Image (spheres, rainbow, N blue to C red):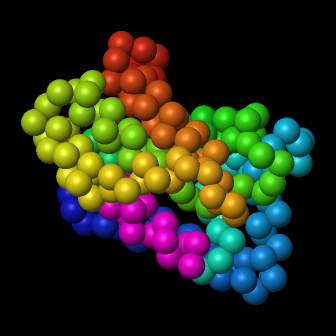
Amino acid sequence: MPIAERLRVVLVLLGVLAAVQLVNMITGYCLTHHGIIPRTVYGLQGIVFAPFLHGSVHHLLSNVMPLAILSWLVMSEGTQRYFRVVALISLVSGVLVWVFGRPSIHVGASGLIFGLWSYVLARAWYQRSIVSVLIAMFVVLTYSGLVFGFIPVPGVSFESHLAGALAGVLISWGMHSKTLLAKG
C-alpha cells in the first residue's frame, strides 16, 4: 500500500479523535457519558463510541502515538483489511467490556490499541512470514510495556486492555486461518 494512503488514514483517524476531544471539552465532557457502561442498555452505545472518547487531553495524547504506529503496521496488509480489523476488534472488545467490565464508564482507544498490538503479534504466529515476524519483533521491542496495562489500576479500564488484547488475537486467528473471517 502506498505510504501516502497509509499516512492519510492515520491523519484522518487522529483528526477525528482530536475533533471529538475538542467537542467533549467544550461540552464539559458530556460526550464521555456515551462510553461503555457494562450491563446497561444505554451503555451498549459505548461499543461504537468509546474508542473515540477520552477522559482528558492527557488520556488522548497517551493513546495517539501507539494508535498511529500500530495502525500503520496493520495497514501493511492494506486499508480494507485494516478497517475490518479495527471494526472487529472494537466490536469484540466492546462487547467483552460490556459483559465483564466493572460498573463504570469505559472510554478511550486503549482497547483498540491493545487489540492492534496483539493482532500484530498473533499475525506473525499465523502468517510466519519474514515481514510479519520482523514487524512483531519491532512491536515487542517498542511496546512490551503494554503488558503492564493488564494490571488493575484505579481509574484505568484494564478490562478494555484485556478485552482488546483477546479480541486482537481472535481477529488475527480469524483473518489468517481458514475461517469465515479469512474469506473476503
Main SS of the magenta part reads: helix
Please tell me which residue is depicted at 23% across the width and 43% down the height of the picture. 136
Side of 172 relative to 96 (left or right): left
Please tell me which residue is depicted at 31% across the width and 66% down the height of the picture. 7
Q: Say above or below: 176 vs 140.
A: above
Q: Say above or below: 174 vs 120.
A: above
Please tell me which residue is depicted at 55% across the width and 50% down the height of the picture. 151
Please tell me which residue is depicted at 32% across the width and 47% down the height of the picture. 74
Q: Quadrant of residue 122?
A: top left
Residue 16 in view in this figure: yes
The image position of residue 1, as x and y in percent, is 22, 51
State the residue in front, 79 or 114.
114
Q: Quadrant of residue 59?
A: bottom right
Residue 84 in view in this figure: no
State the residue in front, 33 or 148.
148
Range covered by the magenta-colored residues = 58-71
The image position of residue 10, as x and y in percent, is 39, 65
Outermost top residue: 178
Q: Say above or below: 162 vs 4.
A: above
Outermost right residue: 41
The image position of residue 70, as x and y in percent, is 35, 55
Q: Quadrant of the C terminus?
A: top left
In magenta segment, residue 22: no
Side of 152 relative to 120 (left or right): right
Number of numbered markers: 0
In magenta segment, residue 65: yes
The image position of residue 146, as x and y in percent, is 42, 54
Outermost left residue: 130
